[in-house]
Amino acid sequence: GTIEEDAERRDFTVNALYYSIKDFSLHDFHGGLDDLDAGTLELIGDPETRYREDPVRMLRAIRFAAKLDLTISPRSAAPIRELAPLLQDIPPARLFEETLKLFQAGHALKTYHLLREYGLFAPLFPQVATLLTKENNSPFERFLEQALTNTDDRVAADLPVTPAFFYAALLWGVVEKRSRDFANESTLPPQDTLLLAMNEAIDQQIKTIAIPRRFTSDVREIWLLQDRLPRRSGKRAERLFAHPRFRAAFDFLELRGRIDGRLKELIQWWAEYQQANAGQRDELASHSPAVAHGSPADDEPSERAKPRRRRRRSPRRPKEGAA
């Protein structure tokens, strides 16, 4: 079609700006320049009709508002809260790609606040939404904001970020709560309640957002290492330090420590361990407690003491010449 028809198909007026390399001019078909000057994000066409055509446009409105520091116009914002449930009809695989754009582009914290403000957070993350408070000041909410700030800082510093770390932080509150629930409802050991909680949290989340298995595997390892990092005596520390997800797990532990002061000693110990040479690491591990404060008393399943089975002795063969 024509350039005018193409401009009509854009989502927002600020997306309908065209630069001509022929005469170095800017073509503005829908008042996008005025909206940029006013700091306003304005939808092209009737907002309710456009959102119903593609509910993901509501997420794009949040993304552009956060990225460009714009305010969604009252006209464009009005239908969002009412139409937010339409996101449940979007294929989970598409929503995974959209969450990457929302939270991995350097504006994760602001995006999170806007999603909550416009009622779009709960359709994406229903389990997590049940933990949120009006005051936005629970320990989990402060932890999540720390994680999102950390992600933004890494993007600003041109450091790599991974969806696994984001989803590990996002669902951590759900895992902690369900693990406590399972512990209260059963006599299962802590490792089993943690595994049950992890599986449930991921299984529920992928119904809404199809997180690829290569990322959910890393999420699980980050969580499992939170349970293993306190047990660092003997050879355990060496094995944990060699784990492929150790660094991500330690960063995760540091984030937790900003909210939970009981983790301060454990974080300091691992920070020293990483800077030490081989001999110093052996010394640290030899004077380390097997279990830190607040950690389960049981060892990891692979190192639990197992009952020894008595070997069945075969009957003795008679010597040659014996009767």
Image (cartoon, helix red, strand yellow):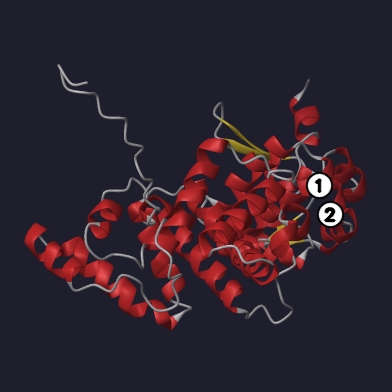
Q: Nearer the viewer, residue 31 or 199?
A: 199
Element type where label 2 sits in the image: helix
Give the image location of residue 225, x and y in percent: 41, 57
**Could you tell me how many numbered marks the image carries?**
2
Q: Residue furthest top?
A: 321
271 versus 139 height, above or below: above
Q: Nearer the viewer, residue 120 or 284?
A: 284
Do we see residue 158 in this rendering? no
- Quadrant assignment for the C terminus: top left
Seen at 66% across and 57% down, the residue is 65
Element type where label 1 sits in the image: helix
**Disc sitting over residue 87 in the figure:** 1
Q: Badge 1 local density, few (<14 within 10 Å), some, or many (20+)?
A: many
Give the image location of residue 189, x and y in percent: 54, 63
225 versus 100 height, above or below: below
Residues at marks 1 and 2, CA–CA distance in whole angstroms = 6 Å
41 versus 265 height, above or below: above
Give the residue type at disc 1: Leu
Seen at 22% across and 57% down, the residue is 235
**Disc sitting over residue 70 in the figure:** none
Give the image location of residue 134, x and y in percent: 74, 79
Which residue is labeled 2 in the image? Answer: 84
Q: Badge 2 local density, few (<14 within 10 Å), some, or many (20+)?
A: many
| Left or right side of 136 for 72 | right
Q: Residue furthest front?
A: 323
Give the image location of residue 35, x and y in percent: 72, 56
Q: Residue furthest left?
A: 279
Give the residue type at disc 2: Ala
- Quadrant assignment for the N terminus: top right
| Left or right side of 10 for 161 | left
| Left or right side of 182 for 74 | right
Seen at 87% across and 59% down, the residue is 75
